[in-house]
């Protein structure tokens, strides 16, 4: 039997009509693919492991509660292994192969520096928690949002604490020789000087240097009244703390969050040496004077405990940060659907999303959502259940 | 300041010297510079921390197991990275093969042990302060190795066999010496010395996977300055390197200390390419 052109066109038309009628019914039950690029292994994985616990809990909660209008969130994870190349490969596969609606992460700045420009070309909304300032730019990356502080906010909080709370004017700023360390010193020293500080010592030191006494003696002889180290290397930071203790030098150390990590604690020669060490942290996940958490954070801790999520080897703010991201995206999808432009439009008008980690707000020309006043300093030796006491000088 | 330069400088110099001797022991037996020397040092620290700190074994047992780990890696180096390339020494393929093995071990350590520095246990329960054990332990280890190697090479038959291999491999083989077994034994010995360097220096350097490249780099300087295969030269050059590096830390500080160290290194090599204690190479005509 021969098939005329008219019959073929009719058949094709019927197929198109039939498929377009059937599609909404199927799509309404399809899971929503959400791309996720954590560093679960490799040198910078401790952050990713903590964040991952929060993300997994949030996705489970959303799905257990019925998902997004009846559709489950399907978290499609690609471990970046702390490697920017693998992060780029993962991002390409998530957007081209898996056709995800949104990408969460990467969670380390080095990986995000490689991934953000790539995702900007694929019309995919992205939410990441990385601190490097250049990782958001509404003009260059209009679909990329940051639900965490910038380096400027982190350094600004530490500088404010040294200058305004501790009233120290002569400051020593030291880092290791990594990109993060040198960039931090180069960014924070001008900020300190602009606030009227006298930076009496500024240096980058190889993190493997086993003896930092020469550097601390140089700081001491220059009259430093506070040491501000910027490094994520626990060995380097612990050597600064130990040397200060061995010298019997009563000077505060104010700086990077790793100063308060368990790895740094393990490397201290004496537990007492951890006194007067003030790392960055975030007010909503800290104990206020009197040892209290906010109601929102306390309820979150209870949820973590009932879900049997391990807190012993990680920090509360990492889990809280991870927990907030799917909820924020879930709220956007419930409100406007899963189309990229609609999600970005929603986020561009987001005001005070009530996260455990912090209240997040964006606008069309500001994609850095974390509030300045929630970046604080804490007492390193007060760690309990993954959270710290606010450093002396902060009010409740 | 002087006290700190001497104690820390000599201690770190002894660690460099021991890594230099590790290079030399392997070089003497095979004419190969194995870049696993620094990795052996790193492994000594990590295994010491693992056995004593984490698993809670007695110090003596942990020490012996750490050395055994070094011996094992030394033997594996000889079999995997050195033996296959001995026939083409002039092509220097050993640079690639030994570096590759060192990288494999380093990455494996990073995955299994972690990428953060971890504490190395106090070996003797003595109060801290003054001339602490973290300073005198590397010095004691270095002195022990120097005396031990002198006794081995000068007063034992196997030691003389090592020297014979180092002097002229072909002649030694013609005389019936088991060249392959002796080379393997040399690598095992080098493995133990490298692991001892990391173990004795564990409190200073911590148990950290990233110590491997640092020791490979700085441990090679005494070899180049002291003369290749010359253990006495390596010890003197290692101690000088440690003292100079620590002095530079005090005088110029920061990253400039490393610049100063390698500037002097290059100047010395330009002035004496055979090293401070090395003899000029005689060319057959």
Image: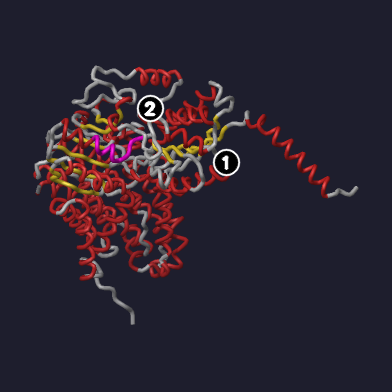
In the depicted structure, whether residue B281 falls above or below residue B196: below
Residue B200 is labelled as none
| Residues marked 1 and 2 touching at CB (< 8 Å) | no
Magenta stretch, residue numbers: A148-157
The numbered disc on residue A98 is 1
Q: What x and y, as percent, mark residue A264?
A: 28, 35
Q: Does the magenta stretch include residue B226?
A: no
Image point 40% across, 63% down: which residue?
A: B177
> Vertically, is B98 above or below A133?
below
SS label for mark 2: loop
| B279 or B221: nearer the viewer | B221
Few, some or many C-alpha atoms within 10 Å of disc 2 (few <14, some 14-19, many ≥20)? some
Secondary structure under badge 1? loop
Q: Do labels 1 and 2 share a chain?
A: yes
Q: Is residue B72 visible?
A: no
In front: B27, or B45? B45
């Amino acid at each position: 039997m021969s098939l005329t052109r008219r019959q073929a066109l009719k058949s094709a038309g019927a197929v198109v009509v039939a498929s377009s009628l059937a599609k909404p019914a199927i799509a309404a039950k399809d899971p929503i693919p959400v791309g996720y690029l954590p560093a679960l292994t490799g040198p910078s994985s401790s952050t990713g492991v903590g964040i991952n616990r929060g993300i997994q809990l949030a996705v489970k909660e959303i799905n257990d509660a019925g998902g997004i209008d009846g559709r489950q969130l399907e978290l499609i994870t690609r471990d970046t292994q702390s490697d920017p190349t693998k992060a780029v490969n993962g991002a390409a596969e998530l957007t081209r192969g898996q056709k995800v609606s949104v990408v969460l992460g990467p969670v380390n700045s080095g990986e995000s520096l490689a991934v953000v420009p790539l995702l900007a070309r694929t019309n995919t909304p992205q939410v990441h928690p990385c601190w490097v300032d250049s990782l958001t730019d509404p003009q260059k990356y209009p679909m990329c949002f940051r639900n965490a502080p910038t380096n400027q906010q982190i350094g600004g909080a530490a500088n404010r604490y040294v200058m305004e709370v501790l009233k120290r004017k002569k400051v020593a700023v030291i880092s290791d020789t990594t990109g993060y360390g040198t960039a931090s010193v180069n960014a924070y020293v001008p900020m300190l000087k602009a606030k009227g500080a006298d930076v009496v010592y500024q240096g980058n030191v190889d993190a493997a240097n086993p003896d930092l006494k020469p550097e601390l003696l140089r700081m001491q002889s220059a009259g430093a009244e506070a040491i501000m180290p910027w490094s994520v290397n626990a060995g380097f930071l612990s050597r600064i703390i130990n040397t200060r203790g061995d010298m019997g030098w009563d000077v505060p150390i104010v700086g990077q969050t790793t100063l308060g990590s368990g790895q740094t604690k393990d490397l201290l020669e004496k537990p007492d040496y951890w006194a007067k060490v003030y790392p960055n942290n975030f007010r909503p996940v800290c104990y206020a004077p009197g040892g209290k958490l906010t109601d929102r954070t306390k309820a979150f801790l209870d949820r973590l405990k009932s879900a049997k999520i391990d807190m012993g080897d990680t920090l509360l703010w990492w889990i809280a940060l991870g927990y907030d991201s799917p909820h924020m995206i879930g709220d956007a999808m419930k409100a406007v659907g899963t189309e990229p432009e609609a999600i970005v439009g929603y986020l561009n008008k987001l005001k005070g999303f009530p996260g455990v980690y912090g209240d997040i707000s964006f606008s069309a020309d500001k994609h850095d959502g974390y509030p300045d006043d929630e970046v604080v300093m804490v007492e390193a030796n007060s760690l309990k259940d993954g959270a710290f006491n606010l450093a002396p000088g902060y009010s409740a | 300041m002087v006290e700190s330069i001497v104690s820390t400088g000599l201690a770190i110099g002894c660690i460099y010297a021991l890594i230099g001797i590790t290079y030399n022991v392997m070089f003497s037996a095979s004419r190969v510079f194995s870049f696993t020397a620094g990795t052996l040092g790193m492994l000594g620290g990590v295994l010491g921390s693992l056995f004593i700190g984490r698993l809670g074994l007695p110090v003596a047992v942990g020490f012996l197991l750490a050395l055994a780990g070094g011996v094992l890696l030394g033997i594996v180096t000889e079999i995997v990275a050195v033996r296959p390339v001995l026939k083409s020494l002039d092509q220097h393929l050993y640079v690639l093969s030994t570096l590759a093995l060192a990288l494999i071990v380093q990455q494996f350590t990073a995955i299994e042990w972690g990428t953060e520095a971890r504490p190395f246990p106090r070996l003797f329960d003595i109060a801290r302060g003054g001339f602490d054990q973290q300073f005198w332990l590397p010095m004691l280890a270095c002195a022990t190795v120097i005396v031990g190697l002198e006794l081995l090479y000068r007063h034992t038959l196997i030691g003389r066999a090592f020297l014979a291999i180092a002097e002229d491999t072909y002649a030694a083989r013609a005389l019936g010496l088991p060249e392959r077994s002796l080379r393997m034994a040399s690598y095992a010995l080098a493995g133990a010395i490298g692991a001892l360097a990391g173990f004795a220096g564990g409190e200073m350097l911590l148990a950290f996977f990233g110590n491997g490249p640092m020791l490979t780099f700085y441990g090679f300087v005494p070899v180049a300055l002291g003369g290749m295969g010359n253990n006495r030269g390596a010890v003197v050059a290692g101690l000088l390197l440690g003292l100079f590096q620590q002095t530079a830390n005090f005088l110029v500080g920061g990253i400039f200390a490393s610049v100063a160290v390698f500037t002097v290194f290059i100047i010395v090599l330009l002035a004496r390419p055979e090293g401070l204690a090395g003899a000029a190479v005689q060319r057959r005509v």
